[in-house]
Each structure stands twice: as structure tokens, then as C-alpha cells.
Image (spheres, grey):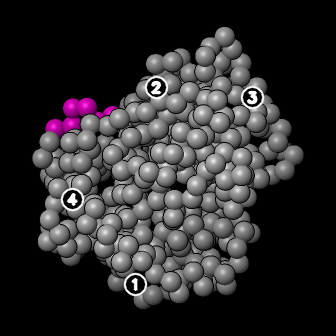
């Protein structure tokens, strides 16, 4: 995928594992430059953010007056989503917690969700995907040899949250997504999950089933829920001073929350994809994106971040156990998995997609709506 001479940013730790990376005359990459020019203005800014959050909370409460719930919170059992639920409780909101059950939940994450719901006194609903369809779609993305292995769940989650919000007449979805820890992510590492042209092509050419039950969330569905139903997404962690280590301590102390052993290991599949498949097959180490964001946010130094790469992103013994589990659950042999790992890596650009059309639509939407109120419509 990458024939460039190796190079790493002078300021963050992003490197040529992003095949589109560009460096300026100072040796700084376009990721950290973009963070400082765009994203830094969208993270917590003291009193200004405090005032904005007060307005947001008042609007959410007003929209849910007389209703059982005033917002939906997608909860995975991970740090971000559980901490969002904690903040919602502190602010007096009435959320309905929704968990996407895709068959890969770790036992710890399930216990975390139940503890959070019980201790905070929130109702909890599980959205269960059709396993056979979902498994077939996951296999299709694996066989397509693209880094967007997690596209199936990344499209199912917003689809489910919007469906449930609409069913209950709820106008706000609160997400655990945030710029403090997720501000940097190359498009070549994970292309837009909302591109249905891309998803349909991969399923039609690498899958074996028609997707009859799988929840879709392309631009048409997104426009329907935003324009017709008036549903908005709020990224609440952008309005509070958010530090993951501090959030973990609060969750552990007050809510009986347990750590699940690694970034995104609340899902056994996601943990294996990010720690093993992506670095081994695609030379993509998600730690670079996370640490680069933290460097820009002032949470870690570049020297501290670089030390992290002295260690592999996975433990070989544990990775083999995870591989066996994933193969068994997906119904493939070890030989098939090894062939998938050996197939030449592809990019989303190697398959039909609607990138240009979607970019035009998003540009039109931004012009029509102006600056996005409450940072609710982050693409």
C-alpha cells in the first residue's frame, strides 16, 4: 500500500503508514497541522464550553419535557460511552441507554453496561443484529482486503440509535465520540462508513447473503432523521475537560466499572482487528492516531508517545487465542484466515464508492446550515 520512503512527523507520531500523509517545510504533518487549525477550536475551552454545555442541557431537557426520555446514549461498556452516561446523570438528563449487540461483546463490557444502568438508574435497551447477516458482512470486508474492517458495526450503531430515537420521539443522541482522544484518524485507515455504494459493492462481490435486516445509514437515512425527524447528535465530551485516566478512576470508584484490557477491547472483534490484523496486514497502528491526538491536546509528550512503539500492539500468545476464537465464530478455517492476511492490501479507492458525491452533499449541507450549532453534526 505504501511505496514512499519512511518518514515520521516532527511534532506528532503519525508517519507514512498513512499513504496520503503530507509534511510541511518544518516536517510537521497535515494531521497535527489540521488539529491545531480546526480541531483545537472544538475541544473544551473553559468558561465558553461550560456556557455552551448549559445551553445544550437546557435544550435537551426542554425537548423531553413530559416524555419518559429526553435523549439516547449509545453505550458499549467502554470508557467514553460510560463516562457520557455519568455526565448525563450529573446534569439531570433522562437518557435511554442503547447497546448494540453484534455478538462480540466481552463479558466485562456487558457487566459494565449493567452496572452503569443500575447504579445510575437509567433504562437500558439492547439492539440485537441478525448474526448470520452481520457475520457475512464482516467476512466480506475481510475478504475485500481493506482496512475498513469495522465498517459493518460503524454503520449499524448510528442506524440503530436513530431508529430508536425516532421510535420514542427523542430529538437528541449523545455520543461518546470526542476530539480530545479521537481528533486524528487518516481516511486511508478508515473511510466514511456512510458510503452505501462502497458497502453494497463489497457485500455484493465478497459476501454471500442479501442484507435484508441489517440497519443502513447512508446519506438518505441521515437526511431523513436530521431534516424530517429533527434528530441531532451531541458530542458531549467536547464540552467538558476530558481525560481518560481521570474518567476511568471515576467510573471504577463510583460505578463499579472494570477495565477490559486494551483500547476497544469492550468488543473482542474490534480489539483483535486493531491490535493484530491492522498492524500485521496493513501496517496500521491505531496507537499512532490516538497518541498523536494526545500530543496535540497536551496530554502526553512526543518522547513518551515514541516509547510506546518499543512494544508490539499485541501479545503473541493472546493474539493466537483471539485468532482461534475469531475464526471459530466467523466459521472460517485457520488456513482461510492466513490467506486473508496474505492477500494484497487494498484501499477504499480500489473499489466503487461515492466519495465525490458525498463530499458535495456535505458541502451543500454545511452552507445551508452555516456553522454547526453545538458541534452536533461532525462528519
How far apart in space, not on screen, are marks 4 and 1 (Cα)?
A: 37 Å
Mark 3 vs mark 1: in front: 3
Tell which of 262 and 205 is nearer to you: 262
**Residue 34, relative to residue 28: is it above or below?**
above
Foreground label between 2 and 3: 3
Of 294 and 29, which appears nearest the observer? 294
Residue marked by disc 2: 164
> For the residue labelled by badge 2, is the local secondary structure a helix, a strand or a loop?
helix
Question: Which type of secondary structure does the marked residue at label 3 adopt?
Answer: loop
Q: Earlier in the sequence, mark 3 or mark 1?
A: 1
Return the x and y of residue 250 as percentages of the image width and height: 72, 52
Q: What's drawn in magenta, residue-wise?
A: 210-215
- Disc 3 to disc 1, C-alpha distance: 52 Å
Q: Position of residue 50 (x, y in %)?
A: 82, 42
Q: CA distance from mark 3 to mark 4?
A: 44 Å
Q: Which residue is mark 1?
A: 4
Q: Which quarter of the rendered picture does the N terminus lie within?
A: bottom left
Circle nearer the N terminus (2, 1): 1
Q: CA distance from mark 2 to mark 1?
A: 46 Å
Amino acid at each position: 500500500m505504501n511505496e514512499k520512503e519512511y518518514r515520521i512527523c516532527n511534532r506528532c507520531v503519525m508517519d507514512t503508514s498513512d499513504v496520503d500523509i503530507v509534511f510541511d517545510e518544518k516536517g510537521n504533518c497535515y494531521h497535527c497541522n489540521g488539529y491545531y487549525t480546526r480541531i483545537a477550536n472544538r475541544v473544551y475551552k473553559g468558561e465558553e464550553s461550560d456556557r455552551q454545555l448549559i445551553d445544550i442541557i437546557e435544550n435537551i431537557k426542554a425537548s423531553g419535557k413530559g416524555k419518559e426520555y429526553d435523549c439516547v446514549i449509545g453505550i458499549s461498556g467502554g470508557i467514553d460511552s460510560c463516562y457520557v452516561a455519568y455526565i448525563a446523570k450529573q446534569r439531570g438528563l433522562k437518557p435511554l441507554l442503547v447497546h448494540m449487540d453484534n455478538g462480540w461483546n466481552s463479558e466485562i463490557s456487558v457487566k459494565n453496561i449493567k452496572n452503569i444502568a443500575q447504579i445510575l438508574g437509567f433504562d437500558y435497551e439492547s439492539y440485537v443484529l441478525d448474526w448470520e447477516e452481520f457475520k457475512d458482512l464482516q467476512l466480506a470486508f475481510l475478504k475485500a482486503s481493506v482496512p475498513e474492517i469495522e465498517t459493518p458495526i460503524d454503520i449499524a450503531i448510528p442506524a440503530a440509535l436513530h431508529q430508536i430515537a425516532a421510535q420514542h420521539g427523542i430529538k437528541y443522541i449523545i455520543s461518546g465520540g470526542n476530539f480530545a482522544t479521537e481528533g486524528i484518524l487518516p481516511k486511508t485507515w478508515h473511510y466514511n462508513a456512510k458510503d452505501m455504494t462502497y458497502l453494497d459493492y463489497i457485500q455484493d462481490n465478497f459476501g454471500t447473503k442479501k442484507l435484508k435486516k441489517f440497519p443502513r445509514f447512508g446519506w438518505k437515512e441521515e437526511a431523513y432523521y436530521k431534516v424530517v425527524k429533527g434528530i441531532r447528535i451531541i458530542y458531549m465530551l467536547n464540552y467538558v475537560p476530558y481525560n481518560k485516566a481521570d474518567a476511568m478512576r471515576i467510573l471504577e470508584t463510583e460505578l463499579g466499572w472494570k477495565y477490559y484490557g486494551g483500547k476497544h477491547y469492550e468488543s473482542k472483534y474490534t480489539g483483535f482487528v486493531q491490535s493484530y490484523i491492522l498492524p500485521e496486514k496493513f501496517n496500521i497502528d491505531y496507537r499512532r492516531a490516538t497518541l498523536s491526538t494526545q500530543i496535540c491536546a497536551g496530554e502526553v509528550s512526543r518522547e513518551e508517545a515514541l516509547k510506546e512503539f518499543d512494544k508490539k500492539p499485541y501479545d503473541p500468545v493472546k493474539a493466537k487465542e483471539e485468532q482461534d476464537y475469531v475464526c471459530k465464530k466467523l466459521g472460517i478455517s485457520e488456513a482461510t484466515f492466513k490467506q486473508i492476511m496474505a492477500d494484497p492490501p487494498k484501499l477504499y479507492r480500489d473499489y466503487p464508492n461515492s466519495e465525490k458525491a458525498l463530499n458535495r452533499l456535505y458541502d451543500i449541507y454545511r452552507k445551508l446550515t452555516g456553522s454547526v450549532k453545538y458541534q452536533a453534526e461532525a462528519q
